[in-house]
Image (tube, helix red, strand yellow):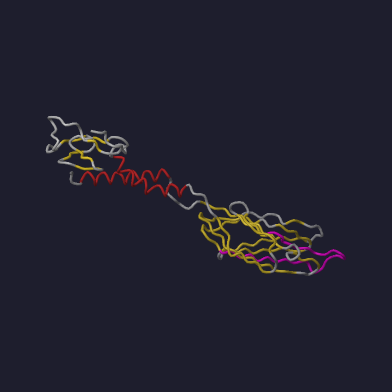
Amino acid sequence: MDPAPSGFFAPPAASAGVPESCDTKKRDPQLGTLGGKLSSGGATLCGTSQFVGNHSGPPYMKSFRKPLTLALPLILAAAAQADMTFSNVTVDGASIVEQGMLGDNGYTIKFDAVQSKVTGNGKSKTITLGYVVTTTELITGFTFSPLGSVSRGDVNVALDHSGTGDSFAWSSTTSSVSSLAQKPSESLAASHTYNVLATINLSTLNTTPTNRFGIASLSQFNISYQTTAAPVPEPATCLVVAAGLAAIARRRKKGSPQL
């Protein structure tokens, strides 16, 4: 007789103690009590037949496979990297020269230099900017660091994140031109999505010394967001859950009728 193919059950050699008819029940230490014939892959399992070739390991491993398979997506989700997107960008009052991602969790918009500045005495202008920020993690705060300058004038920015408002102001009463200094980070209620509206007000003083005009500009809008991972089971927790499910499966199998 040719050897059994890999992965098939191989019937044992005939002996006086175990008839080929398999009428006698035999207990196999791994396969349990067997009565009669049990076919698998075209071969007959008889008495104390064993797996040959590529078997799947001890029988208890079978009860772990399904729970571990169910737990795998949770493990992968825990290790997934955040994915942040910015959409529906609109600007009124100035033209956009360039825009794009600022690192992994931020966005930058560069305005036309002339349209994003006022000069003279008692001049003013308003620029409005809107967008939607969405991420797979939870947004918990942001850092606003625009580029611009002010001299004998004011730059005021009101930022609204889905109803949560923050104000930023830069002022100068002197003739020296000052850059817009970065402000401290602000916190937000944890959310995956925010509708953002920015209102930028530029103005210069009404009265200035002779030949001394005011300047107020915000040429580039830069913002970065802080995020935190959404609560998901840790890999170790997933394995514990999988082990518990496997124990339940073994208990149910133990209580089922034997072949």
Q: In front: 220, or 96?
A: 96
Residue 121 at x, y = what percent? 81, 68
Is residue 119 shown left or right of residue 255?
right
Is residue 232 shown left or right of residue 144?
left
- Residue 250 drawn above or below residue 187: above
Q: What's drawn in magenta, residue-wise?
A: 195-220
Tally the numbered discs: 0
Q: Residue furthest top?
A: 16
Give the image quarter of residue 48: top left
Q: In the image, what residue occupies the spot 13% across and 30% down?
A: 17
Give the image quarter of residue 255: top left
Is residue 238 shown in magenta?
no
For the C terminus, the quadrant is top left
Residue 105 at x, y = what percent? 58, 53
Q: In front: 22, or 180?
A: 22
What predominant SS class does the magenta segment belong to?
A: strand
Q: In the image, what residue occupies the spot 52% across and 49% down?
A: 81
Residue 76 at x, y = what percent? 45, 47
- Residue 49 drawn above or below residue 138: above
For the N terminus, the quadrant is top left
